[in-house]
Image: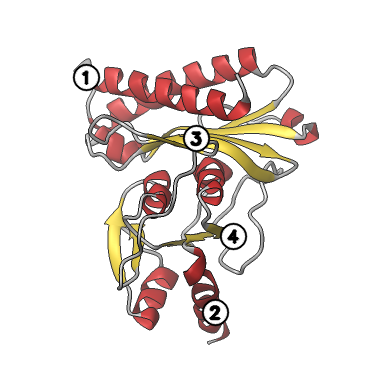
Amino acid sequence: MDDAALAAHLAECAGRILLEVRASGMFEGKALGKAGDETANQFLVHALRQQRPDDGLLSEESKDTEERLSKSRVWIVDPVDGTREYGEARSDWAVHVGLAVDGEPVTGAVALPGLDGGMVLRTDQPGPLPAAADKPRLVVSRTRPAAEAVAVAEAIGGELVGMGSAGAKAMAVVRGEAEIYLHSGGQYEWDSCAPAAVAKAHGLHISRIDGSALVYNQRDTYLPDLLICRPEWAERVLAEVRALAAT
C-alpha cells in the first residue's frame, strides 16, 4: 500500500473507531473527547509503526521525542482534530494523517467522519474545485475568530462562516463551502500538516500568512498561522495581511 492509500485507510479506520467510541454511550463531554483521542491515537501510532517502521512520527497525543528530527519522512497525525466538536456530537471535526518529506507536506488524508456517510479527502484523488461564490466566504473559529480574518473579510467584502476544527475548515475550502481559511490564533504542526497536503493536491494555495512556506518536522512544533485559499484570492489576502501588519 502506497503512502497516500495508507494515510486514507488509517484516517478512515480511525474515524470509524471514534464513531464507535461515541456510540458506546459510555462517555460524554470532555470524557468522550479524552477517550476518543486516546483510542484513535493508539490505533494510528501502532499502525504507522508497523507499516512504516523506518519513518518518524509526531502525534498530538503521544510524547514527542527528538528521534523524528533526523528523519526525512515523518508522519504527523492528529487523532481527533476538534475534540470539543467531537465531544458535542457535532459534524465539524476531523482525523488528520499527514506525511512530511524534508519538511514539506506532501501526502495525507483528512477524514470527516461526522458528516452523513463520512468522507475522506486525500492527496492522491484530487477533484476539480467547485465554483466559487460571488462573495468570498472565510471560515473562522466559531468561538474565537482570528482578528486578521475578521479584518480581511471586511476589507474584501467577505462573509465569515464559523466552524469547528482546523481540518473541517480547510476541507470546507476544498469542498467549495468557502473560498478562504485564514488562521492566526495559534496552532501546531498536527493541526495543519494533513489538511495542507490535501489542499495543495487539490490546487489550493497554502502558506503562512506572511506568504512563506509551511515547514514541518521542526524541533518546536508550534506553527501558529496559515492561509489556505483558492489561488485567485491568495495575492489579495496576503496583501491585506501585510497592510494590517504595517498599521
- The local crowd at label 2, few if under 14, some if 14 to 19, many if 20 or more residues have their Cα within 10 Å, is some
- Res 46 → quadrant: top right
Residue at numbered disc 4: 207
SS state under label 4: strand
Which residue is at the front of the view, 242 or 31? 242
Residue sitting at the far front: 128
Amino acid at dot 3 = Ala
Which residue is drawn at the image coordinates 56% and 44% (left, top)?
197
Residue denoted by label 1: 23
Task: Check disc 1 and give the amino acid type.
Answer: Ala
Please name which of the two marks, 1 or 2, marks the residue nearer to the observer.
2
Position of 101 with respect to 135 (left or right) is right
Q: Which residue is mark 3?
A: 109
Where is residue 221, by image quadrant?
top right
Above/below status of 133 relative to 71: below
Residue corresponding to mark 2: 239
